[in-house]
Image: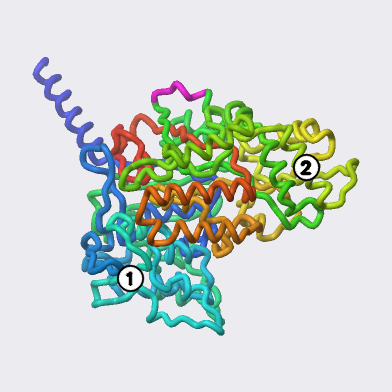
Amino acid sequence: MKKLFTLVLAMLLITSCIAGASAEKVLHLYMGSDTETLNGQNSVETNVNTPATYCQSTLYRAVPDEDGLGYHYIGEIAADLPQQIDDYTWRIPLRPEACWANGEPINADTMIYSYKMGLNPVLSNSMANFIADQNITIKNATAYNLQTSDAPVAWEDVGIKKIDDYTLEIVTEGVATQATVCSHFTTRAVVPVYEPLYEAGMAEDRTSTTYGSTEKEWMASGPYKIESWVFGSVQTYVRNENYWLPELFHYDRIEIRIIPEMNSRVELWEKGELDYLGLDSDYTSVYIDDPRTLEAPSLTVYHIDLNCKNPNNPLSGNANFRKAMYHAMNREVIAEDLFEYQTPSGVYVNTVAGSLSDSGLTYRNSEPGKAVAEMVESWGPAGYSPELAREYLAKAYEECGLSEDTVITLIFAYDQSETHWNKTAQYLQAEFPTIFEGKIQLDFDYHTDSATSYKQTHDTWDFSPNDWTRGASRTYPHTCFYYYLSTYSSHPNNFFDEEFEAQYAVCESEEVKTNYDRLLEETKKLEEIYLEKVIHIPVVQETLYEMYSDRLVLPVEDYTSVIGWGIAFADIVE
């Protein structure tokens, strides 16, 4: 009897192990809003990164090191790392096995068509800048994209060439490194597009395409493909059987729920129905001591964009008004009490900027970066000074011809679901009348659009909170200001300054970009101009607090600013 029991138990264990081994590995994630399009060439919204990461391929991909201590680049569509021919020319061999989810090949013609469409001056894709000038500057790519009838630029003059069916050549306008070439070709803007569907969706005048507006008008090329997409509800991905590097990815299925409300996310997390939870200001203190909570530095400096063209605000656009608003921000209260467990910041260059430079010295830890921070602290804690705020407002009133008893109501436009900004807006509404002795009031315009979409259709706002990040700033710190140049087509502001743009051009020059010590000094000058002109208002340096379920085995021991905690490459162990 005892032998029979032992045999039955062994059989049950074997059956259990087999069942466990064959159990489907399903990753449960969320996004705060759904993607309006899967076409990464034409959306500035960061939520497009999710389907791009899992369902698209790029020339290169950053993957975790085997020892879990970092990351490295591998060829994804590319067969090998880029080969340098001369100072400005790079050859990229392509994998013959790379293909679309339907099995059709991806080759040099695919990539040439994709980049040509991405840079097409008639289509005016919102992410064209990321193809032309992200981590490297491709020769004549921006000129081609921005050409006019008076100054035409031929595609043949752009530094993207087909050498043969499986070889590309990239020509840059400045000296690049192998790592920066790789990193340039890793974003959603440079994924290949499937020509038959791209053309099928093309408008008659070729000014737009419906490519990516539904999963049926789009083609996957990554480790996963979209099984279903119920807009506003859930995106479901399953393995792409035609993907050529399947060993890098361990999930069988990925379910992305669309969950705008934080409370709903937490409820699902507590039920074990989510594998990831990004903490906001309401929940950081709740979970800060939970062993599943991981802390990481961030590229993000939360800030407030300023409208200099509000027809309802007589101070709109005045430089001293902008300075008054800068000094009216009590960043210590906002960062520590309202955002919670964050760092007040009166400067804009983030703490990660420069971390991937050859020396690894971040701008904020350099002598030039520290000098700017010390200047800001001399005004008050992280730049906060009610006295300076009142002085600058008085100058603005005088310059704009307003009587001292004039009351201005500013409009703070934001999404109420962003709890940290909701708290900040309510706080400033109470603070401004005190700081400005009743002259400045604050009212709200609530919206659920992205800040970029909102500002494309509204002009009567004054404050708009934002958190633009620039991955290239890890290598070149000054590039975090890129979005505030007039040349960036989707710029979030409408205030531009010639001195600021000229100094940015200095930082971009080959002489400066190839001399990191010089670049730090020139970035200091750029940041000083930014603070003098108040391009926008920095408020909080973000620290990320993220939770991962116990069943996830993350592939890295420490956070890296390129792949984060590497959730795309994690495994599931029940």
The residue positioned 35% from the left and 60% from the top of the image is 185
Q: Are marks 2 and 1 in contact (CB under 8 Å)?
A: no
Is residue 16 magenta-colored?
Answer: no
User: What secondary structure do most residues of the magenta stretch adopt?
Assistant: loop
| Residue 189: percent from left, percent from top | 43, 61
Name above or below for residue 3 compared with residue 433. above
Q: Nearer the viewer, residue 192 or 160?
A: 160
Q: Residue furthest top?
A: 2
Residue matched to label 1? 171
Name above or below for residue 452 compared with residue 445. below
Residue matched to label 2? 393
| Residue 357: percent from left, percent from top | 34, 47
Q: Amino acid at mark 1?
A: Val
- Where, quadrant-wise, is the N terminus in this rendering? top left
Give the residues in magenta.
286-291
| Residue 264 shows in the view | no
Which image quadrant for residue 170?
Answer: bottom left
| Residue 223: percent from left, percent from top | 31, 55
| Residue 328: percent from left, percent from top | 70, 36
Q: For the residue labelled by badge 1, is the local secondary structure a helix, a strand or a loop? A: strand
The residue positioned 68% from the left and 32% from the top of the image is 385
Which image quadrant for residue 8?
Answer: top left
Classify residue 212 as left or right of residue 444: left
